Image (cartoon, rainbow, N blue to C red):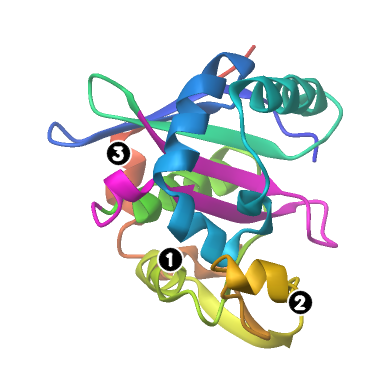
Amino acid sequence: MHFPLPNQLVYDDGHRRLTLRPARAIDAGALVEAIHESHDNLRAFMPWAHLEHTEASQTERLVALEAGYHEGGDLVFHAFAGGAERFVGCFGFHDRTLNSRAVEIGFWVRTGAAGQGLATLGTQMLVVLAYDHYGCERVQCAYNEANTASRRVNEKVGFICEGRLRYFELQGDNTLREHGYRVGPVTVMNAIARSDLAGLEWLDQVRKRLTVDLAP
C-alpha cells in the first residue's frame, strides 16, 4: 500500500472524541500496558498475544513499523480517547487484498475501554479515510465466527457478508488452546464496496465530525 501517511484523524462530536495516529515507538509503554490489561481477551483470538510483550520488544517492533510506512507496509493506528488522550487500542489497514485500491481493516480495543462503541467508531473513521482520501474501491473486514464482539462491529458499520472461509486463520496447537486460544475453523469475510456507501446511515454524520490531517 502506498497511501499518504496522515498525521492524525480526529472525530469530535462535542461529547465523544477519538484520535487515530500512526503507531509510533514513543507509544510502546502505553501499548504494553493495554496489552497486559487485555491479556485474556486478546489471547482468545490473537496468536501474537501469546508472546511475551515488553516495552523494549514493542519499541523495536514499532521502529520497524514506522520505517515500513514509507515502503508500502501496513498502516497501523494507535487510538486515543477523550481530551486526556488515553490509549485505547489499535486499528490498521492491512494489505491482504488482490486489488491495489483496496484494504483490509483490523482492530482491537483494550478491555477497559470495551463496550463504549470505540471499535465501531474507529472502523467508521478508517472507512471514510479509505474512500474519501485514498480513493479505495473496496474495504474488507474479516472476523472469526467465534468472535461475537467483532461480528457486532462488522454489523454496526454495515459490512456486507461475502463468504465463510474455512481454516483461513491459524487454528493453534494444544498449548495455545490451553492458554485461552478460541479461534474456530470458520472466518467470515465482509466488505464495503464504493457502490455500497450510499446505504451507510452513519456516513454523513461521521464525515461532518471527522478531521483528517494528511501529511504534506
Residue at position x 35%, y 50% in the image:
111
Q: Which stretch appears magenta?
A: 87-116
**Can the viewer see residue 192?**
no
Q: Return the residue nearer the eye: 93 or 195.
A: 93
Please report contact status of discs 1 and 2: CB closer than 8 Å, yes or no.
no
- Asked if disc 3 and disc 2 are in contact, CB closer than 8 Å, the reply is no
Q: In the displayed structure, would residue 137 be above or below residue 16? A: below
208 or 96, nearer to the observer = 96
> Which x, y percent locates residue 196?
51, 70
Indicate the secondary structure of the residue bearing disc 1: helix
Q: Residue 109: x and y, percent? A: 41, 48
- Element assignment for label 2: loop
Q: Secondary structure at mark 3?
A: helix
Amino acid carrying mark 3 in the image: Lys
Q: Nearer the viewer, residue 53 or 25?
A: 53
How packed mark 3 is, by other alpha carbons closer than 10 Å (few <14, some 14-19, many 20 or more), is: few
Which amino acid does the dot numbered 2 rest on? Phe
Quadrant of the frame with the N terminus: top right
- The residue labelled by disc 2 is 168
The CA span between labels 3 and 2 is 37 Å
What mark, if any, has residue 198 been given in the picture?
1
